[in-house]
Image (spheres, helix red, strand yellow):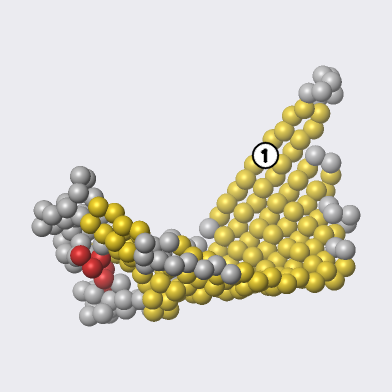
Amino acid sequence: EVGWNFTKFLLDRTGRPITAEDAWTLWTPRLTADWRVTDRVMLYASAAKGVKSGGFNTMANIFPEERSFGPETNWTYEGGAKTAWFDGRLVANAALFWVDWTDQQVVAASAAGTNNNFYTNNAARSRSRGVEIDLTAAPADGVDLRLAYTLADAEFRDYQDPDYVTITGFAPTGDVSGLALPRQSRHQIAAGLDLDGDVAAVAGLGWFAGADWLWQ
């Protein structure tokens, strides 16, 4: 059980000291399986439960029932392949994933006030699915190349957002089910280049340089 008394620090919208108390029990199992098809090719699958602890909201202008929020949990299912080619100079990996969220923690604005009213609450259900591909190559000594691509289709499956209850098309419940999750990029590409070598004129002295590029 976890509790906090903010008497010395914060007051609620009625001028009373903010207190909050709640309790959570967390369990995080994980199952994995892999098959080494050859010395250079491995297939795998996994299922794992992740948990993010609950917490407390300390903004002044929120309702008492909005003071605490529960933990979020997700089951992540993944399957893919890890491979190496050309004596390890090329590594190619690919994976499919599915993340099923329950009680995802999201930020909303309370109707208790017009300022100092943001709080974290729990979306009933969310889902993310997609694919990840990454390549690493060493075409020559001292040269390393990296390229990765991720497709993530992430959306709310069941959530009534308090921010949307007065917006045309979402009123009166603020149902945003089917819309994309905030701060999520559907497509992401990353590339990198590393170079290193020796300074021929000075024994024991080397040099290196690198560059990274990200698009989302």
Left or right of 180 in this view: 95: right
Image quadrant for the N terminus?
bottom left
Residue 156 or residue 145, whichever sits in front: 156
Q: Is residue 118 visible?
A: no
Q: Secondary structure at mark 1?
A: strand
Residue 15 place in picture, x, y as percent: 11, 53
Q: Residue at x 78, y 23 (%)?
A: 205
Label 1 Cα neighbours within 10 Å, binned few <14 / some 14-19 / many ≥20: few
Left or right of 111 in this view: 128: right
Left or right of 23 in this view: 145: right
Residue 142 or residue 22, whichever sits in front: 22
Q: Residue at x 72, y 33 (%)?
A: 208
**Residue labelled with disc 1:** 210
Left or right of 30 in this view: 92: right
Q: Residue at x 16, y 64 (%)?
A: 112
Relative to residue 206, is residue 30 depicted above or below? Answer: below
Residue 114 or residue 21, whichever sits in front: 21
Looking at the image, the residue that sits furthest to the top is 202
Residue 125 place in picture, x, y as percent: 42, 76
Looking at the image, the residue that sits furthest to the front is 1
Residue 115 place in picture, x, y as percent: 18, 56
What amino acid type is highlighted by mark number 1? Answer: Gly
Q: How many discs appear?
A: 1
Residue 127 place in picture, x, y as percent: 49, 74
Q: Residue at x 80, y 48 (%)?
A: 138
Residue 104 or residue 143, whichever sits in front: 104
